[in-house]
Image (cartoon, rainbow, N blue to C red):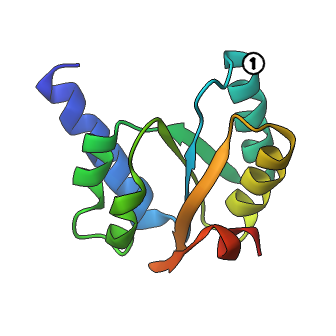
Amino acid sequence: MDRTEKENTVAGLRAVFESANLVIVTRFSGLTVAEATDLRNKMRDAGAKFRVTKNRLALRALEGTTFKDISGLFTGATAIAYSKDAVAAAKVAVEYAKKNDKLVVVGGALEGDMLDVDRVKA
């Protein structure tokens, strides 16, 4: 990935963080392409999105946004689920994680307020 691609990725992630009301951070180690596609389809049906992130680029995109406090969650193989709806992304992520142990919800934020795993599940 060259510098221009990285800048575009950071700009795209920043747009996500600025427009979303809810961001859920997940670990997805071992998720197959078919499973990831299934998860993305379920997210889309619920009005949410699921995106694999590069941690360094996500951390840059978080700077100066209301979601900056979740930066500590970006370690390992991470992906974000996000939505404008206050529950859509969390609901789909939690339901999917119950059925597939390759997806783990690690936390998130709702309109800038940190959510631990229990609050995401609630």
Most distant residue in the left direction: 3
Of the pair 103 and 109, the residue shown nearer to us? 103
Q: Position of residue 91 (x, y in %)?
A: 78, 61
Most distant residue in the bottom direction: 113
Whether residue 94 is visible to the viewer of this picture, yes or no, is yes
What residue lies at 73% left-to-right and 44% top-to-bottom? 44
Vertical relation: 29 (above or below) 101: above
Whether residue 86 is visible to the viewer of this picture, yes or no, is no
Q: Position of residue 114 (x, y in %)?
A: 49, 77
Query: Which quadrant, please, contains the C terminus?
Result: bottom right
Label 1: state its secondary structure: helix
Q: Position of residue 120 (x, y in %)?
A: 67, 69
What residue lies at 35% left-to-right and 72% top-to-bottom? 69
What residue lies at 30% left-to-right and 37% top-to-bottom? 9
Q: Is residue 59 left or right of residue 51?
A: left
Query: Which quadrant, please, contains the N terminus?
Result: top left
What residue lies at 34% left-to-right and 61% top-to-bottom? 71
Q: Is residue 46 left or right of residue 110?
A: right
Of the pair 70 and 75, the residue shown nearer to us? 75
Q: Is residue 64 left or right of residue 114?
A: left
Local packing at callout 1 (Cα closer than 10 Å; few below 14, some 14-19, many 20+) is few
Of the pair 44 and 92, the residue shown nearer to us? 92
Vertical relation: 62 (above or below) 3: below
Q: Position of residue 2 (x, y in %)?
A: 16, 20
- Residue of label 1: 34
Three-letter amino acid code of the residue under disc 1: Ala
